[in-house]
Image (cartoon, helix red, strand yellow):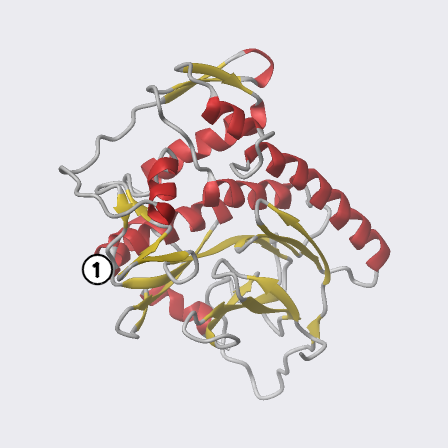
């Protein structure tokens, strides 16, 4: 790999190519760059300092544009990764000792949880509203059934669980849910972790927190992040490259990028192939013509929510949902091999 790029892990769980470059000139709108004059030459890409670890069953990476201060960058990145790791340990359903596992195992309809888990549960409620009900964090049992259980005949759409949160003393949150409701925070937690991590890197004008493919991005004035979207049909193949930039004057610009799809977590039961994206309208893996959706907006959590919703909804309803949501870009790959994008995405795809 060329020295001017680093490798980050996309939500498709394959390598994506990154580069941070100085922009030769900036427009007022960071999504629309002016045509270059005859003497304008892009600056060479800057190599960020990157530090990685494992968290929530995936890879957590911090990229910082260090401007020569590599020692401080690595120190700050490691400190942030340790802090995010502690949060992630509270939110993982794969750890029996996590606060989420304790909540799921508690038979009582009312349980009080700490502020970190409470904040992510609240983000889950917001994700349900944002996605018009297509993203639902109460579907843990349906997800596990998709992995292991034989096909069953369902008697109509499942009843949606009604649950709520109430603020308590010292930041603690009271969770009220029907008996048997268990939570799978999944992408909601990863998007929340990425966004929260980026907030803690306020001293770094150009930074990326990659929570296993949910990317919280901040770009300094006059700079540009190049983010590759992987093609799930072949290893090492790029579907498109997004250019996330900031005007040369003004404040840093914040972005969120997330990719969701049906091509990674898949299981075969006899002749039936299933995946991990559960449609709450049926209680089973979504029947969709979308293999993969990538969304660009202002936060990793919102991008994750809307990317997942677009896959579950299918290409026609999904693109309409994303358009209504006012996202800054979206690229969808369909079962038929078509690559679809909202019109505003084209400005992000320009070299």
Indicate the secondary structure of the residue bearing disc 1.
Answer: helix
Horizontal placement of 293 versus 155: left or right? right
Where is 249 relative to 18, above or below? above
Residue 39 visible within the image: yes
Which residue is at the far bottom? 38
User: In percent of the image, x 17 and y 38: which residue is there?
Assistant: 157
Q: Position of residue 129 (x, y in %)?
A: 32, 36
Where is 222 relative to 37, above or below? above
User: In percent of the image, x 38 and y 59: which residue is there?
Assistant: 261
- Using the image as rendered, state which of residue 190 and residue 157 is in the foreground: 157
Where is 59 relative to 43, above or below? above
Horizontal placement of 10 versus 270: left or right? right
Which residue, given by chain and number where applicable, does mark 1 sit on?
316
- Using the image as rendered, state which of residue 143 and residue 245 is in the foreground: 143
Q: Position of residue 286 (x, y in %)?
A: 27, 52
State the image quarter where residue 269 is shown. Answer: bottom left
User: In percent of the image, x 51 and y 25: which residue is there?
Assistant: 118
Q: Position of residue 9 (x, y in %)?
A: 57, 61
User: In percent of the image, x 21 and y 34: which residue is there?
Assistant: 158
The crowd level at tag 1 (other Cα within 10 Å; few <14, some 14-19, many 20+) is few
């Amino acid at each position: 790999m060329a020295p001017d790029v680093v490798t980050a892990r996309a939500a498709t769980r394959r390598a994506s190519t990154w580069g941070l470059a100085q922009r030769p000139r900036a427009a007022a709108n960071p999504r629309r760059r002016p045509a270059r004059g005859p003497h304008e030459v892009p600056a060479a890409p800057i190599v960020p300092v990157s530090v990685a670890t494992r968290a929530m069953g995936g890879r957590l990476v911090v990229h910082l544009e260090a401007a020569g201060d590599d020692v401080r960058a690595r120190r700050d990145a490691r400190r942030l990764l340790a802090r995010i790791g502690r949060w992630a340990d509270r939110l993982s359903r794969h750890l029996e000792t996590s606060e989420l596992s304790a909540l799921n195992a508690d038979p009582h309809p009312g349980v009080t949880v700490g502020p970190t888990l409470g904040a992510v549960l609240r983000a889950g409620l917001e994700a349900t509203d944002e996605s018009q009900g297509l993203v639902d964090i109460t579907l843990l049992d349906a997800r596990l059934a998709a992995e292991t259980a034989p096909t069953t005949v369902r008697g109509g759409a499942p009843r949606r669980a009604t649950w709520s949160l109430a603020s308590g003393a010292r930041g603690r949150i009271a969770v009220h849910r029907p008996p048997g409701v268990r939570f799978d925070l999944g992408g909601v937690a990863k998007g929340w972790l990425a966004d929260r991590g980026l907030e803690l890197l306020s001293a770094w004008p150009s930074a990326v927190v990659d929570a296993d493919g949910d990317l919280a991005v901040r770009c300094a004035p006059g700079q540009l992040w190049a983010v590759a979207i992987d093609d799930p049909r072949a290893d090492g193949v790029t579907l498109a490259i997004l250019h996330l930039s900031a005007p040369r004057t003004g404040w840093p610009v914040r972005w969120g990028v997330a990719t969701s799809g049906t091509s990674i977590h898949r299981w075969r039961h006899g002749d039936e192939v299933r995946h991990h994206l559960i449609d709450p309208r049926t209680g089973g893996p979504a029947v969709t013509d979308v293999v993969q959706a990538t969304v660009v907006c202002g936060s990793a959590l919102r991008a994750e929510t809307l990317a997942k919703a677009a896959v579950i909804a299918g290409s026609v309803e999904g693109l309409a949902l994303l358009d209504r949501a006012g996202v800054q870009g979206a690229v969808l790959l369909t079962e038929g091999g078509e690559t679809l994008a909202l019109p505003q995405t084209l400005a992000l795809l320009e070299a």
